[in-house]
Structures are given as structure tokens and as C-alpha cells.
Image: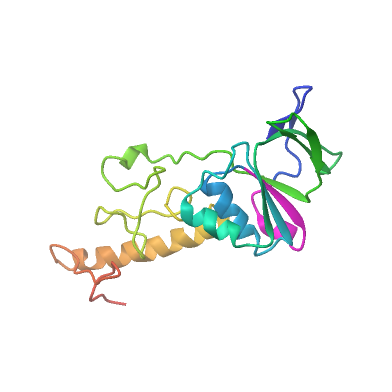
Amino acid sequence: MVADEAGEIQVFGTQWCGDFYRGEDVLVVGGGNSAGEEGLFLTRFARHVTIATRDPELTASKVVIEKVAERPDIDVLTNINTVELKGESHLETVVVEDSLTGERSELRPAGMFVFIGLTPNTEIVGELVELDGQGFLTTDAWLQTSLPGVFAAGDARSGSTKQAASAAGEGAAAAIAIRCYLGPLAGGMAEPQLDRGGMPAVMEV
């Protein structure tokens, strides 16, 4: 959501699902890991992705920045503030301003994805399990956290795509992993015997 100069909140054309814009040009607003990862993800659908950040450079991790730089279908605009969204029934124009020169210009993406900050709601388990540098839950290949028996899925998990469909799939995978974890306990074992992937070495099907 972006407020225009009249103070009205414009929300049309802002999206969280890239498949709506297959073969189109899209805009990602933000410069951190979420914005960079979303830009990379959108290249699966969009023809071209523009990432606009108000900072002098992307603030994402080195790995994400390098991956973005390798993509010929991603442009990065720095020192850019999003000022206004224009359109009637759908997004037509995004007005941006260069924070160094004050010069304004217009972008015409088919859709805009806003990733200007994301704080995971992980405080409830923050002192129990391992978190990454941004506060997201770290997991193994089977979605188990650093605390045995505690699993994580969806947007609060480090490395997740922040997509609803992916979160649903992770939830199903975590449920299966939990069942496998609890199986040995139900059979009277003191602790599940895990293999290197985090699953029980022996389990009933």
C-alpha cells in the first residue's frame, strides 16, 4: 500500500502472487532479502522484473545480491522512493522519485509487489529454537527446528518463498514429519532414532 500526495491509500495492482503476471513486466519495491528473493522468484513467471529500493544499494545478503546481478531479466533501481500509484480499475503507473536529484519519473508495470520490510512473529519460541539473522526459524530438510520435536512451516521459516501455496505444502510436509517423529514415541521408545535427514531411521507405514 502506498499513499498518494492527497493522502489516499492506493492498493489496486499490488499483488503477492506472481502467476497473475506471466509474461508481463513487474515491479518489486524493497531492497532486502525478501525483495531480492521475490524478484528472483518472479522471473519464473514475469518477462522482466524491476527492483526499486530507496537505499544506495540492495541490503540483501551477498548470495541474494549475486543471484540478482546474474539475471539479465532483473534491473535494480537505487535511491528510488515510490511516491504514487495511478490507475482507475487497475494499476497503470507508478510514480517514483530519485532521492538524490528529486527527479520524478513513471514506471508502467503490470503489477507491483511490496517487500519493504518483514518481521517474523517468532518471539513465542525465540528463546527455545535457533533463528537466523532476521529472526526466522531455521529448519532441517524435514522442517524440524533446532529443538527436537518442534517443526516450522510457512512464512516464519527461514528460506521459505513467502507464497501461500508453498506455505500450504510445507504445512502438509511438516504434518507428515511430525507423525513420523511421534511414531517411535507412541511405540514406547524414549526418543526417536533419527537419520541424517531428521526422520526416524525406522518407522511404520
- For the N terminus, which image quadrant? top right
Q: Is residue 28 visible?
A: yes
In the rendered image, residue 22 lying in the magenta stretch gets the answer: yes
Q: Is residue 124 above or below residue 61?
A: above
Q: Is residue 182 left or right of residue 163?
A: left
Q: Is residue 66 above or below residue 15?
A: below
**Magenta region:** 15-29
Q: Is residue 95 above or below residue 77?
A: above
Residue 60 location in percent, x, y? 51, 47
Residue 85 location in percent, x, y? 78, 36
- For the C terminus, which image quadrant? bottom left
Residue 202 location in percent, x, y? 23, 76
The image quarter in which residue 196 lies: bottom left
The image quarter in which residue 203 lies: bottom left
Q: How many marks?
A: 0
Q: Is residue 170 left or right of residue 196?
A: right
Residue at 53% over, 59% down: 166
Q: Is residue 184 left or right of residue 157?
A: left
Colour scheme in the image? rainbow
As drawn, which residue projects farthest toward the front? 101
Residue 131 location in percent, x, y? 34, 46
In front here: 3 or 191?
A: 3
Residue at 27% over, 54% down: 146
Residue at 59% over, 62% down: 70
In the rendered image, residue 8 lying in the magenta stretch gets the answer: no
Q: Is residue 112 above or below residue 194?
A: above
Residue at 74% over, 49% down: 111
Q: Is residue 160 visible?
A: no
As drawn, which residue projects farthest toward the top? 6
In front here: 62 or 1?
A: 62
In front here: 187 or 18?
A: 18
